[in-house]
Structure formats: structure tokens, C-alpha cells
Amino acid sequence: MKKFTLSLLILGLLFTADSFAQQYGFVNISNKLPNSAGTASLSDMYWISDSEGWICSGAAGEIYHTTDGGNTFTTQTTQYYTNAIHMLNSSEGYAGGYNGRVYRTTDGGATWSVLGSIGGTLLSISFPPSSTTGYCSGYGGRIYSITSSGVSSMTSGVVANLSSISFPGSQGWTCGEQVILRYNGSWLGDQSNPTESYNAICMINNTTGWAVGDNGVIIKTTDGANWNYQSNPDTSNRTLLDVFFLDANEGWAVGNSGVILHTTNGGTTWNIEAAGMTTNMMRAVQFTSSTNGYALGNNAT
């Protein structure tokens, strides 16, 4: 999950169970944020359940925490603004962003302590399931490993800004600009992908994943190395900023001008959801189940 700086639009998703086609109702809960959020840029989020999550401010040193599905939020503070967050559980988590700062909490965010710095803006954080070692990426090809004791530099071999990183298991992938890399003990440039500019990547295991990017590009791999285009129904070719899959079938992508895409067959077909709901850019999307999810975007809509 990554990223840059934007304001907030959070959408709670309510499920109507009487249709296999899954008709969703979008509820704007952005007015539940603390007043200090204002029109602040918000960048990323992490949910550990339907009800408990954290949202990063990409404009101020604030993180917003809820335990009731976004009905109420409390404000947590960091030294600088953050672009990415990953919680291991309700107590321990990591966030990072401006000036390369990496923060750690062991009390659910009541306090965030500086763990280290990657030397340049941090854009994305990912921890493999059940692992206490995570990874982050950022400007200038920076990739670092993260543990409770600090951060350590890794060699990416590229200078491209790496906007997204995904570790579904022992292997990991990162993308940015025209680059996709794979980690298998070291970072490898062994990916065969179309020459596009990529903003987000989501791997569900060591073979299957998706990446999205500028001009609405969507690509998929089923072997962890070779990537192929998928068809985007958005004729406006709006840039996509994030992608999230629950499993091999159900996934979501969000991007410019409020576009929200949804698939139930692994991206063989994508559908536009909630067309015209907002014109604000959407930066991040995460689902905790097929019936509950959140998306955030621009201008505290």
C-alpha cells in the first residue's frame, strides 16, 4: 500500500446480499475525521479488521485511528507527514514518509517513535504475512528492510522512484515509473513487463499479481515474471494509483477523477463502480472482506 500526498475521501462499502452481482452502496464518512484533518492531503491506510484502521496524512504529521469502522477517529502524531503505513496487529506497526523517516509504534499509535531514515522520501511499506521483517521503497530507487531495531539499505540497481512494494511471502515485488523488480534473496530485474509508468502493485502470492499505472494501464502476472495487459473499461484512460486484491478473483483499483474499478474474475473483466460519485482523485483502496472496504482520495470530500 504507498504513496504520495493527497487529501481524504473515505468510502465505507455496504453489501447487498440478495444479488450475486454484488451491488454496493458507497457512504461518504470523511466528515467523521478530526477537524485538524481539514483539507489535508492523506496518502495511505491500513486496516486490521472491518472496524480498526489507521489513515496517514500526507500533509501534516498526523495519523487518524478508528476502532469503529470510521464512525469516530482519534489523532496520532509523527514528526513529519507520512506516505505509507503497515500495522502488524493492533499494537505494533510502522509508518514512513517525508525526509525518509521510518516510525514504529508498539501501543497502537498512541506514540510513534523514529526508527531510522532511508535518506529520501519513503513511498510504500509492506510486511510479509506473520513476519517481523518488512520492506519499504521510495525515491531514487531506495529499498530498505525494516525490523524493530532499525532499517537497513538494500541494493535495487535502479534510480527510478519506487512507488509501491508488495511482499505476499518470501518473495517481493516493487514498481515505479517504468520498472518492476522482484526480490528473491536480492533484487532482480527479471520481469518481462510492458513499458509503462506504474504506480501500484499487489501480489497475492509468489506467482499471481497485478500492477496499475498511468493512462489506466492494468497488467497481470500468473508466473511472477511475465506481465500481460488487461482491458480497462474506462474510455477516459484515467491514471490508476492503487490496486488491491482479496484473492485470485476479487480486486479493486482506484485513480484520477474518482474512478473505481472492480473485478470478480481476476481482471478478465473489470467494471467501473460508482461512476460520477466524485471527481476527486482516489489514492488508496483496501478491503477487509468482500463485503467491507475503504477508499481514500482528494480534498477531504
Image: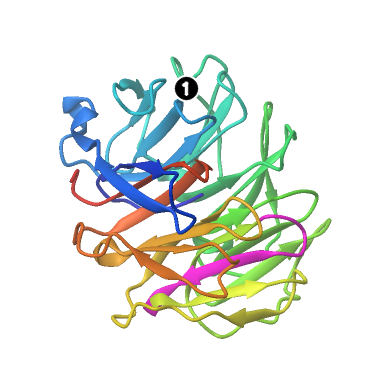
- Residue placed at 77% from the left, 55% from the top? 171
Residue 116 position in % (x across, y down): 56, 34
- Residue placed at 38% from the left, 29% from the top? 79
Magenta span has 210?
A: yes
Magenta stretch: give its range: 204-215
Q: Nearer the viewer, residue 14 or 155?
A: 14
CA neighbours of label 1 inside 10 A, class few (<14), some (14 to 19), many (20+): many
Indicate the quadrant where residue 188 lies. bottom right
Numbered disc 1: secondary structure: loop
- Compared across the picture, whether 27 is left or right of 156 comes to left
Where is 4 relative to 237, above or below? above
Residue that lies at the very extreme toward the right in this rendered image: 185
Query: What residue is shown with label 1?
Result: 112
Q: Nearer the viewer, residue 49 or 110?
A: 49
Residue 201 position in % (x across, y down): 56, 62
Where is 165 relative to 98, above or below? below
Where is 29 relative to 113, above or below? below
- Compared across the picture, whether 40 is left or right of 151 comes to left
Q: Nearer the viewer, residue 33 or 110?
A: 33
- Residue placed at 67% from the left, 41% from the top? 134
